[in-house]
Structure formats: C-alpha cells, structure tokens
Amino acid sequence: MALHFSPVLANWPALLDGVILTVELSASSIALGMLGAVGLSALRELGPRPLRWVIDSYIELIRNTPLLVQLLIVFFGLPFFGIRMGAPAAAILGMSANLAAYAAEIMRAGVVSIHRSQSEAGLSLALTQRQVLQYVILPPAIAKVWPALSGQFILLMLASSICSFISAEELSGAASLVEQQTFRSFETYICATVLYVMLAGLFKVVLVGIGKLAFPQSSGLARLQAKGDAA
Amino acid sequence: MIEHFGAQEMLYLISTVRWTLLLTLIAFAFGSVGGAVLALLRLSRHPLIRGVAYGVIELVQSVPVLMVLFLSYFGLSAAGIDLPPLPAASLALGVWAAAYLADIWRSAIEAVPYQQWEAASSLALTTPQQYVHIVLPQAIRIAIPPTIGFLVQLVKNTSIVSVVGMVELMRAGQLINNVTFEPFAVFGMVGLIYFVICFPLSYAGRKLEVVFHAGRRS
C-alpha cells in the first residue's frame, strides 16, 4: 500500500477552515456552557427544593444520553417548535447544554470539597447566601476542579467532531469533503487526526495557562505567606 | 409516503438495542485486553517502555473517537483487510477504550499502598506473584466504580458507528426519522432508550463507590 499525501495537502485551505470552525464551535460552547454550569450550580444551591430536582434530572439526562442524540434533537427537533437555527448555532447550543451538565457536576464536587466551616464563617460575617457562594465557596472550588474542567473542555473539543452529522463543517466535516474530492480516505483522516492532536495540545497549553493566571496560588496559606513577605 | 412513529417503529428501535449492547461488549473486551497491557507497561520499571505506553495513551486520548473509527476502517481496507462493520467498529472502539481503561486501571494499581508491594517482595514473591496475589485483588475493588462509569461513555460512543455502516440504535433512529419525519419524537425516544441503558450503570457505579469506600475506611 502506498500513501499519497500531496493531493490531501493541496486542499489545506479547506482543512484550515475546518480547524477554525472547530476552534470557534468549541470556544463558544465552552464559554456558554460554563455560564450555564455556573447558573445551574447557583440555582441548585440557592433555589427552592423542586428546582433542585429539576436541575438534577437535567444533569442526569444529559450525562446518560449521547451527545449525538442531543445535537439531533436540537437541530432537527426544535424547528418543529418554531425554533429554527443554522447548523453552527445548533451545534453550539447542543454542546453548551451538554457541557453545562458535566461542568455543573464537576463544580458540585468542588463545592462539596470546600469545608462547611468556610460557608459558616462567611454567614457569620453577615454575608448573604449568594455572597457566600460567590466570594467564599466558588473561587476555591473552581480552582480545585480546574484540571477536571480543562479535561472536560478538551473532551468537548474532540467530541465536536460529530457536529458534521448535523452539517456543521468543522474539521471532521472538512476532512470528509477533502476525502470526497481526493479519494485518499486514509491519508485525509491521518491529516485530520494530526490536526486534532495538535488542537488538543494547544487547548491543554492554553487551559493550563489560564489556570495559572486565574488561580495563581492554590492554597490560602501560600497566599497569606506571600502577603506577609511583601509587608 | 410518510409513516407515523408508532408501535412498529418502536419495536424496531428496541430490536436494534442488541447491536448497541453487542458492540459495547465486544469493544469493552478488546479495550480490556489493550487497557490491561497498556496499564502494566505504563507501570514497567524500564523508563523507555513506560514512556512508550504513556505516549500511546496520551495520543489516543487526544484524538476524537470518530477519527479512531475512520482511521481503523480506512487503514484496514488500505492494508487489504476487509472486515465486516461489526468487528471493524468494535475494534476501533476497543482501541479508543483501551487508552482510557489503561489510565483508570493504572491509577487503581497505584492507589494500592506502596507498603503492600514491599511486604509482598519481602516475602520473596516474584513481580507476577505480587500482582496476582497482593495488588490486583485490592486494585480491582478500587477500579470497578470508575470502570462502570467508563462503560457509560462507551455505550454512548457506540452512537457514532453508523458512519461505517452499522445499524445500531442511533442509526435505526435516523432511518425511522427519514420515513416518519417526526425528529423530536424519534430522537427523544432514542435518547430515552440510551438513558434506560446508561442510567442504571451510572447509578451502580456511584453506589459501588460508596460501598467500596466504606470498606477502605474501616
């Protein structure tokens, strides 16, 4: 068997477009999904009890069904209720809804790991429930679970490859277009795979960097000591 | 002609569940073998072997399942091996699963306290004996809950194998949607069936984690 990469590489603009769309879809879904996850977590902690059941059911429902089914429901199902959108918008909506459930669950684990005395201390300083959550619990909780969240973001980026099923032509969709033009199936998918590995590496570097910037010191004690040294 | 999504279509959907389950089981079998080998190599004393195993695991984990599927499908046919869809798809999913199972099982083995290894080797057990009699029985308890959790991921990821021509639950849903054009009902039902398969697994994984954790604490 002989591999010929040149016809595939000649189509690099198409693959590059795919890479760009993959990054766009993933980044918007991560941003929207994290907003959703924070919203879900806050409502779950602060809202009335029935709301908590609704949110828990939503999280379980999302986590126990394939992303592909969720995308198909958003793209083909919602138009029957008059909600129409293009493929990229549907992909972003479906992936955000998916990520929100996973991230909310990860953040819940982080919140549980913050000792109860922290929120009691906050309440005793006359902070409201919302303020305790916002200033006392969430920042260290998110810092603690940032590696798990980053892993979930990368999984979502990789999973975005199935958006081509609903005709959002991200990297895997672009690859199948190139394949149809060149008839070099194996070579095309090798190139696409290499690009995905590079994207995963890029995401990892960026996410670790964001973690370092946003959560500079992991322990409160280290922060106190740093302040002591400065003073 | 447009059909309605009725009892007959429902029965067809349910009848294709067996392909989803079969695919999951075969892929899990392939993945277990590969995952066990990779986990042991990852814990090898030789840095080179360890490094290669680490590289393979990281590489597969940085690639979408869909690409693993395409690569093995087209790779096999480029190499002149023509497999029917079921073995081809389960082999590909197995390769993908092996990378994740290797990580789960390696961390389970590493979670066994180091003193257990030392005690075993001070009793003059060989490395294989240390694994079989001392470490693995403890590691398996730790590994079972996350392994069941991963099984849920595997079931869900079988939904994309329609690209290589398998008609399992997801593909059956798409076929029915093509004739009924009731996507919300059809895909909603498909999702519900996946949920019925996956939720008991997730639930069992969580319960077992509590049970086993209690055992370690006492």
Image (spheres, coloured by chain):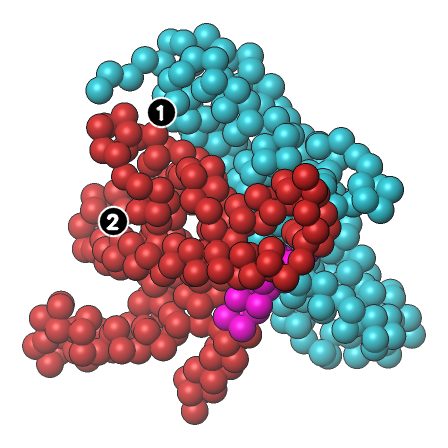
Chain colours: A cyan, B red
Magenta stretch, main secondary structure class: helix
Kind of residue indicated by mark 2: Arg
Residue at 65%, 65% in the rendered image: A60
Whether residue B24 is visible to the viewer of this picture, yes or no, is no
Asked if residue A135 lies left or right of residue B102, the reply is right
Query: What label sits on residue A218 in the rendered view?
Result: none
Q: Which residue is mark 2?
A: B50
Image quadrant assignment for residue A54: bottom right
Q: Please say if B167 is above or below B113.
A: above
Image quadrant assignment for residue A129: bottom right
Q: Which residue is mark 1?
A: A186
Tell me the mark number nearer the camera, choosing from 1 and 2.
1
A145 or A119: nearer the eye? Answer: A145
Chain under disc 1: A
Whether residue A131 is visible to the viewer of this picture, yes or no, is yes
Residue at 22%, 28% in the rendered image: B80
Quarter of the N terminus of chain A within the rendering: top left
Residue at 50%, 23% in the rendered image: A175
Q: Farthest residue in the front direction?
A: B1
Q: Please say if B123 is above or below B72.
A: below
Residue bounds of the magenta highlight: B188-202
Kind of residue indicated by mark 1: Phe
Chain under disc 2: B
* Residue A80 colored in magenta in the image: no
Q: Position of residue A34 (x, y in %)?
A: 72, 50
* Residue B194 colored in magenta in the image: yes
CA gap between label 1 and label 2 equals 29 Å
